[in-house]
């Protein structure tokens, strides 16, 4: 019985030791030690907002709006109306043709149309006038029929084209909301004080800052990133770097691959702009002894995937962004 109790106590002690060791190994992962630190202003005591999976991403919404605008179907082209000038020319030509034909026939019958003379007589005049009248009536009737058909076909074509407004099935694309989100409102406030602010360019800037801070952390030299660290964040990182030095260890960060950069919060307070970004990345993250080079935590060959919220701040206006907080997802 006593031996069994000692066995269970030994197993429990080993489990506690392993869990504490694993926690300490995770604690030194990448910049910030894999923990939350720094200041998010009045939101420091609340966790960063996660992206809403039920809503489409901001680029997807913009692309859908562009596709919707380009999918409007114009009304069907109306049929071309007959030319009045062309109709009259045809009638006159027909009249002259009839005059020549019937005039020649009259002369052949002995000059009856000219009462024995060679000029244009009464019969020719009557024939030409009758032909012109018939041609006029024929084309007038045809014009009225074509005009009626034109009006009906034009109206029908327009009514047929009107319902086919969009070629995007309602269920195929996420629904767009006309209500601005908290992020939209926050970014709008930032743009009011900085007309040059661009969301895409901001993501590129903070991605560069992400690599710069990781490089400073891996070299245990925060002076590399001194200009992009807020005071609270610099003090927190410096404490961790000093502890690594005291243990004579180096946290290696290699082959960083940023998979996604997404803005999750944007706001202003006390004359400062704040934007929180969710970084999703893969990295080789391991810690070595600075003397022997032996790996004491992590792996040189197995990359790890992580998500972290980085909050950036600056004085309101077109000023330099600095890292003010890191929070674990």
Image (cartoon, grey):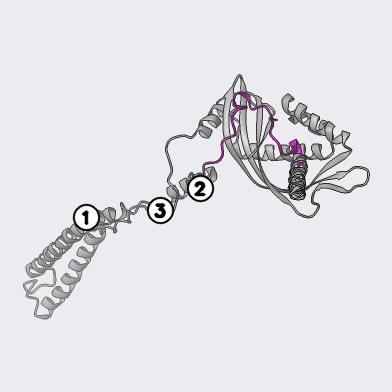
Instruction: Say whether disc 3 or disc 2 marks the residue closer to the N-terminus.
Output: 2
Q: Is residue 24 above or below residue 259?
A: above
Instruction: Say whether disc 3 or disc 1 marks the residue closer to the N-terminus.
Output: 1
Residue 272 falls in image quadrant: top right
Mark 3 in CB contact with mark 2 (< 8 angstroms): no
Q: Is residue 85 above or below residue 225?
A: below
- Residue hosting label 3: 171
3 or 1: mark nearer the eye? 3
245 with respect to 47 (left or right): right
Taking the magenta stretch, the answer to whether it contains residue 329 is no
Give the residue at x 80% y 40%.
215
> How far apart are the alpha carbons under marks 3 and 2?
16 Å
Give the residue at x 65% y 26%.
318
26 with respect to 148 (left or right): right
Residue 122 falls in image quadrant: bottom left
Residue 99 falls in image quadrant: bottom left
Taking the magenta stretch, the answer to whether it contains residue 49 is yes
Tag on residue 316?
none
SS at badge 2: helix
Locate residue 29, reporting x and y percent.
76, 42
């Amino acid at each position: 019985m006593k031996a069994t109790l000692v066995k269970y106590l030994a197993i429990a002690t080993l489990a506690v030791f392993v869990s504490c060791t694993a926690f300490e190994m995770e604690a030194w992962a990448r910049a910030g030690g894999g923990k939350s630190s720094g200041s998010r202003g009045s939101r420091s005591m609340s966790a960063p907002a996660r992206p809403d999976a039920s809503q489409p991403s901001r680029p997807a919404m913009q692309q859908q709006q562009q596709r919707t605008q380009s999918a409007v179907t114009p009304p069907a082209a109306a049929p071309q109306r007959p030319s009045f000038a062309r109709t009259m020319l045809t009638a006159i030509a027909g009249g002259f043709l009839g005059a020549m034909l019937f005039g020649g026939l009259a002369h052949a019958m002995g000059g009856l149309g000219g009462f024995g003379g060679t000029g244009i007589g009464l019969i020719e005049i009557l024939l030409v006038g009758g032909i012109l009248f018939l041609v006029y009536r024929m084309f007038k009737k045809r014009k009225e029929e074509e005009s009626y058909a034109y009006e009906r076909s034009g109206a029908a074509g327009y009514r047929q084209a009107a319902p086919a407004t969009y070629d995007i099935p309602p269920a195929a694309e996420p629904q767009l909301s006309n209500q601005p989100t908290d992020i939209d409102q926050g970014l709008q406030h930032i743009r009011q004080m900085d007309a040059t602010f661009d969301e895409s360019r901001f993501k590129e800037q903070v991605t560069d800052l992400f690599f710069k801070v990781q490089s400073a952390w891996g070299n245990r030299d925060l002076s590399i990133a001194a200009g992009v660290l807020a005071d609270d964040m610099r003090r927190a990182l410096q404490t961790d770097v000093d502890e690594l030095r005291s243990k004579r260890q180096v946290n290696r960060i290699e082959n960083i691959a940023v998979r996604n950069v997404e803005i999750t919060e944007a706001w202003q307070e006390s004359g400062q702009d704040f934007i929180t970004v969710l970084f999703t990345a893969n990295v080789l993250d391991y810690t070595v002894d600075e003397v022997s080079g032996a790996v004491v935590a992590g792996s040189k060959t197995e990359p790890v995937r992580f998500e972290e919220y980085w909050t950036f701040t600056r004085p309101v206006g077109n000023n330099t962004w600095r890292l003010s907080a890191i929070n674990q997802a």
